[in-house]
Image: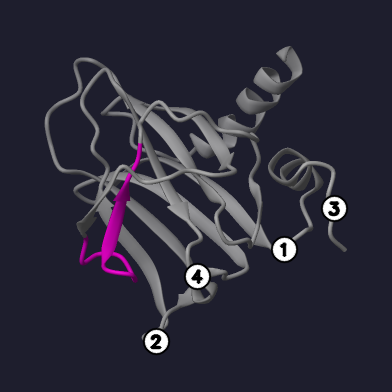
Amino acid sequence: MLRRILALFLFAAPALADVDGDIPARLVEFGVICDLDPTDRRPEPGTVSGVLNLVTQSAPFDVPSTQVPAEIGLSFGIRAKLAPDAPPGDYRMVVTHPPMGPQGQVLETWSAGLIPGDPALNLFTFEEGWELIEGPWRFQLVLDDRVLLQQDFTVTPKGTVPAVQKTCNGDLIMS
């Protein structure tokens, strides 16, 4: 357990580099969730699908990893927190990824749902085959044009991340 926590902090440190230090925002954790059912959905024009799944904010990450296999049902992303004295504002999640959908969209954005002092979970869930886009993905917490924090992920072919495969699929490792 201590190794997992230590690894989380070691991986999180670079994610906090080169961010705006005027507003204290902190990456609490990141990684992969094996199976997460949305509690609701809402229209979100800033996403390729046009909808945003609402999820239980306390859902735990199953695997702290920046490597994510392209597999239907997996979710990945970040849990971030603003300092209690952070100013109010339209804190946004900006996710960049390789071209997706019929328009080749490379950026998605939505309200991050952050309340100063409370952690908020922001994820991308692979629900459709056309979303399984391999390559670099970046999650950024943004206020106006200022990046407050960011975390990079790499989406890889299905079955190529043993820790995720073992945790999410038991001992089934695909080759």
Give the mark, 1 or 3, whose residue is nearer the N terminus. Answer: 1
Q: CA distance from mark 1 to mark 3?
A: 10 Å
* Quadrant of the rendering where the N terminus is positioned: top right
Residue annotated with mark 3: 173
Magenta-drawn stretch contains 174: no
Q: Point out the residue furthest to the right here.
A: 175
Which residue is depicted at the point 21% across and 61% down?
A: 44
How packed is label 2: few (under 14 Cα within 10 Å), some, or many (20 or more)?
few
Q: CA distance from mark 4 to mark 2?
A: 11 Å
Which secondary structure, mark 3? loop
Callout 3 amino acid? Ile
Give the mark, 4 or 3, whose residue is nearer the N terminus. Answer: 4
Which secondary structure, mark 4? helix
Q: Please name whichever residue, 70 or 174, is drawn nearer the observer in this view of the structure.
A: 174
Report the magenta residues as a range: 44-55
Give the mark, 4 or 2, whose residue is nearer the N terminus. Answer: 2
Q: Please name whichever residue, 82 or 155, is drawn nearer the observer in this view of the structure.
A: 155
How packed is label 1: few (under 14 Cα within 10 Å), some, or many (20 or more)?
some
**Predominant secondary structure in magenta?**
loop
Disc marking residue 158:
1
Residue annotated with mark 4: 131
